Amino acid sequence: MNWISRLLGREPAEDAASVGRLVVVDTETSGLDPERDDLLAIGAVAIDGEGVAPEDSFEVVLRNEAKRDASNVIVHGIGLQAQALGTPPEVALTAYRDYVGRSRCIGFHTDFDRKVLRRAFAAHGIDFDERPWLDLAPLAGALHPDSYRSGGRSLDDWLAAFNIGVAARHNAAGDALATAELFLRLRADAARQGSREFKALLAAARQQKWLGAD
Amino acid sequence: MARTTPAPTVLSGLKQALLPHAPFSAMAADDVERIVRASQIRYFAPGEVILAPANTPSDSCYVIRQGIVRGEHKSPDGVSSPEWELAAGEMFPLGALLARRGVTSTYRASGDVFCLAFPGTVFHRLLEISPVFQDFCTRRLAHLLDLSRARMQAEYAASVTEQRGLATPLSALTRNTPVTVAPQTPIVDALKTMEDRRIGSVPVVDDQAQPLGIFTRQDVIGRIVLPAVPLSAPIADVMSKPVLTLSANATAGDAALMMARHGIRHVVVTGEGGRVSGVVSERDLFGLQRLSVRELASAIRRAPDLGSLVQAAADVRSLSHALVAQGVASGQLTRMIASLNDQLTVRVLDLVKPAHDLAGLAVCWLGLGSEGRSEQTIATDQDNGLVFVAQDESTTSDAVRERLLPFARAVNEALDRCGYPLCKGGVMAMNPRWCASLDEWRAAFWQWIDRGDPDSLLASAIFFDFRALWGEGRLAEMLRSDISAHAQANPRFLKQMSDNALRNRPPLNWFGELSAQADAGGVEGIDLKMSGSVPIVDGARILALASGVTTTNTVERLEQAGPKVGVRPDEIRGWIDAFEFVQMLRLRTQHRKASDGGVEGGANVAPIAELSDLDRRILKEALRQVRRLQQRLEADYPG
């Protein structure tokens, strides 16, 4: 029995109802620096009980003034015109906050998304009561140590390993959907190793982060 | 502000994933979106049970997004046996949802499986509002067959454009000045024009000779007679419009393609300034190939000598190939090939007979095996026999045989010259064993039925399907009614036949996947004859013998015997569809191998790599039907 099984097995049982709604979030930014680059788009999809609920999903492109640098457009696909025509940031962020509500959040490499979101909320003076975030990057590594050691660590690597297709990669909502499917898969793996409860998954991800170099 | 929830990208991504699959591909976009929005994406780990047999009605419909789902039936002794499998894009449990009952099988994830699950209420609502969805759910197999046929036609149309004959420009096919009528022309006058000029269609044009519509002979019943339109009404009221046109520079291939795509028989040809310059009909195009069933049949009947029959037989084969390529349904096609072959055989017998003295003998030429069942495919060798009765009862059978054998040999050799090779197993009238008196035949059948050993069972598969082709049909009828009664009274023989029929198992592996076998050359394929048609033919024969049905054609046997032994009509339909699909695939395989030069030993083996995804799915479904038929036999004749 490895540490993760012990950890997952030790958690007290939560009843199914308290699992509640989870929200898988992905952001697109104008660059790779969460401290400097702008938030361009937010995509999210909810997990309610057993599965992903496409009807309960969220997508917004934020209005950004014309930027000096168009190089990143290639990656996130949000053209300068779309950025200019997007939703005013205050409106977009408020809509996002209302969409998430009291739900807990899930992402892949969540440190990045959290910093970008925090900065955006602060910049527009909007109160934001941050929920606990589960990071699938370390959780995947914890549940599949062999794959992790052999080098597959990016979202693309994990999606490929589990044969999960992405209709719109590098689109915030498209990536959120793929990440949500990855979560369903990982949660089932965790259940076999002991527990599928959010708190247990959170603890496993945190511990892996301490242990691993991630 | 743009809509933020639900996310358009999420909905469209999920919709896109459904669109390559039937029925979603043909459904209204709103209805597909309805499914997506009502769905939950669910994950099932390998081996996880998705649905288990229950008494309560199923409340969700699942569409597989990724992975394989396996269905299992639990037998009374508690052993689960895998039955079939479903792949991405497929829905389940259709039967349970349609009947508002619980599922009877276990649905298990065979690897990582992601499904869209939507409520049964949405499923039932879609049945009401979407004819495509309803049609699909209630006629899954039949639907797949239609798709396959449509694709074959499209392939054919694409391939004919490459043929030289169909590179002919339409201007070369439309001679003379075109016959047209004005829109206000009374229907009666338009019909009279068509009759006088012996044309099947007439374009309706304005005073600038611009096409407004077209009226064809095929429209008469549906547009004039049934709706009781007065013949004095203007032709414009009943013409088809808008009319599909091609320029005179387009090729016959373009016209064939247009006809196949739109399901029409006539294309209007336009010349300078868009003026109508003529009409090309389907017959004009296929006339390029010089063949039609009717003409061929009459050429055979009137053939003055063996030489002309040899030519006619070659024409039968090329016509069969052309029709396979056009996607003509297999039942129709094999019956048509059989009918032409019958006429050819009859003509051969008529031509050979005068050189032989058959006076004082009642003789009947029997078609056996696939010929007896009217199910010949293209690659077919001879299976025949002779039954006789001597007028003078004192003549011994051997003496009669002495007289008949040279005649029989001459016929067999003539058929061989016509391209129906001599039977390697010697099942031919020139073989003294199969040139026999009515009593001798009867004795042979009695022995097969009473012994039921492997040789007898092998023989039964060929001889029990005899059919009179030429001569005294009464002899065959007498033999048939005697055998029918004797077999029906021998359950032991039927049981032995059933055991024998169960030996050819459909090649579906444990996971319900097609399991191909490599041939000598290492090419993986499915033996369509042994694992597809033979088990159905055998099953139909047993059902027919058990219920006293005397017809020999497999489809007719299933149709007539099924209800007598209490098989549900939808089940019978499923078996027939499966049989026709496998036969169609056999014809196509033979057609391809023949076009690649010569039909070799593996004429019935479909290389798995050459089957399209759609064909594989239908073949799997067809083989599942074979399995069902076999299960029926197992239940009727338990071990």
Image (tube, grey):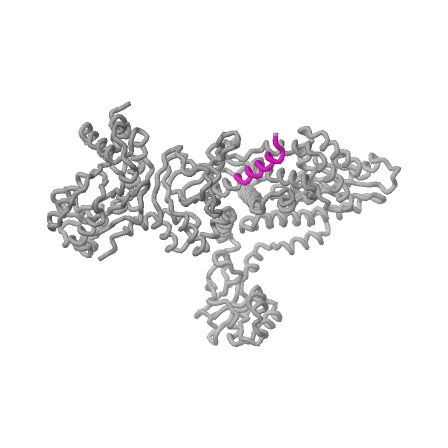
Q: Position of residue B12 (x, y in %)?
A: 32, 50
Q: Front-most of A36 and A51? A: A51
Which residue, as the protein is rendered here, is positioned at the far top?
A: A1
In x, y percent, where is residue B580?
Answer: 57, 45
Q: Report which quarter residue B568 is drawn in.
A: top right
Residue B613 x, y percent position in the rendering: 45, 43
Q: Where residue B195 appears, x then y in whole percent?
A: 61, 69
Apparent side of residue B613 relative to residue A55 in the rendered image (left or right): right
Q: Is residue A64 above or below residue B361?
A: below
User: In the picture, residue B31 is in which quadrant?
Assistant: bottom left
The N terminus of chain B lies in quadrant: bottom left
Q: Please state if A54 lies on the left or on the right of B542 as rendered.
A: left
Q: Is residue B3 left or right of residue B262?
A: left
Q: Name which residue lies at 47% across and 66% down.
A: B243
Name the residue rendered at 32%, 42% in the picture.
Answer: A51
Question: Magenta residues, as a range?
Answer: B623-638
Is residue B487 something that shows in the picture?
A: yes
Front residue of B349/B88: it is: B88
Quadrant position of residue B506? top right
Position of B385 relative to B344 (above/below): above
